[in-house]
Image (spheres, helix red, strand yellow):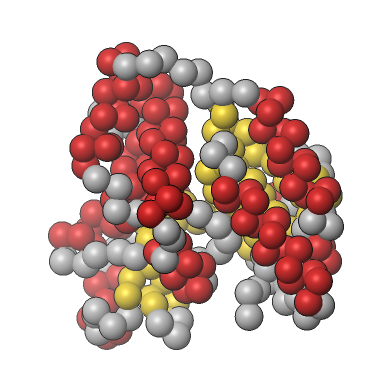
Amino acid sequence: MSGHSKWKNIMHKKEKTDKQRASVFTKIGREIVLAVKNGGPDPEANGRLKDIILKAKANNVPNDNIERCIKKASGEGENVNYEEIAYEGYGPAGIAVIVEAVTENRNRTAADVRHYFDKFGGNLGQTGSVNWLFTKKGVIVIDKEEYSEEKLMDDVLELDAEDFVIEEEVYEIYTTPENLSSVCEALEQKGYTFLSAEAEMVPSNYITLTDEDQIKNMQKLLDHLEENDDVQNVWHNWDEQ
């Protein structure tokens, strides 16, 4: 669950192997557990849980898995104390990177993340060092082949969306994080399905890498972060040409 809302990242997300998909299910499960513990098991009263369930469904997490995680967090299973931590730093050539983690062992996660940055030509920074380069937005991605541009645009104009962007292969709808669930629900009622629907950290600008070593190191940095079980999301401003 890496990067920005460009189609190639969404496509990469959808082409994961079975093992990687299982890891995605596990990570989303942790988010559900944390959301329930912080705000209760009712998604109608817990906006964060509602958004995570939406994200889970967009990632094809089975309903049984979702319900099991909610019950577990409500006290019907093993009790694990997770906490959220965000790390900020720079990859090769100054690529800004935000790493969002959910962990029961802060020291282990911090050591792992720092090791990845150091090993692949980056450096871990202080809180706030790159966050200012991103804005949190709700991002809904819809397959361009499935729906007409004119109809979708008309439907979006009726909703509390901030922007409607036409990319090469997808439509992207931007909302405030608070309006993500309501916009998704309204679109679902109109018969739309989503390739992705979640709150993302959207960069204000992108950087293109041309040096082959920097490209390889940046990709290795992202791969190692994504493969770490504690890492939930990785946001960056690398324009992967």
Depth check: give the residue in front, 50 or 211: 211
Q: Residue at x 55, y 57 (%)?
A: 2
201 vs 157, nearest the viewer: 201
Q: Residue 239 at x, y = what percent?
A: 65, 73
The residue located at (24%, 79%) in the rendering is 146
Residue 157: x and y in percent read: 31, 72
Number of residue marks? 0
Q: Is residue 81 visible?
A: yes
Would residue 132 be seen by someone viewing this image from the given angle?
no
State the image coordinates of residue 19 (x, y, percent, origin top left).
Answer: 43, 50
> Can you say whether 154 is above or below 17 in the image?
below
Which quadrant of the structure image shows residue 58? bottom left
195 to the left or right of 205? left
Image quarter in which the C terminus is found: bottom right
Q: From the viewer's perspective, is 154 left or right of 34?
A: left
Residue 181 relative to residue 131: left or right: left
- Reply above or below: 196 against 132: below
- In the image shown, does 227 or 200 lie closer to the viewer? 227
Point 72% across, 33% down: residue: 110
Q: Position of residue 18 (x, y in %)?
A: 38, 54
Look at 50% across and 18% down and name the residue there: 81
Which residue is nearer to you in this view: 136 or 159?
A: 136
Left or right of residue 199: residue 124: right
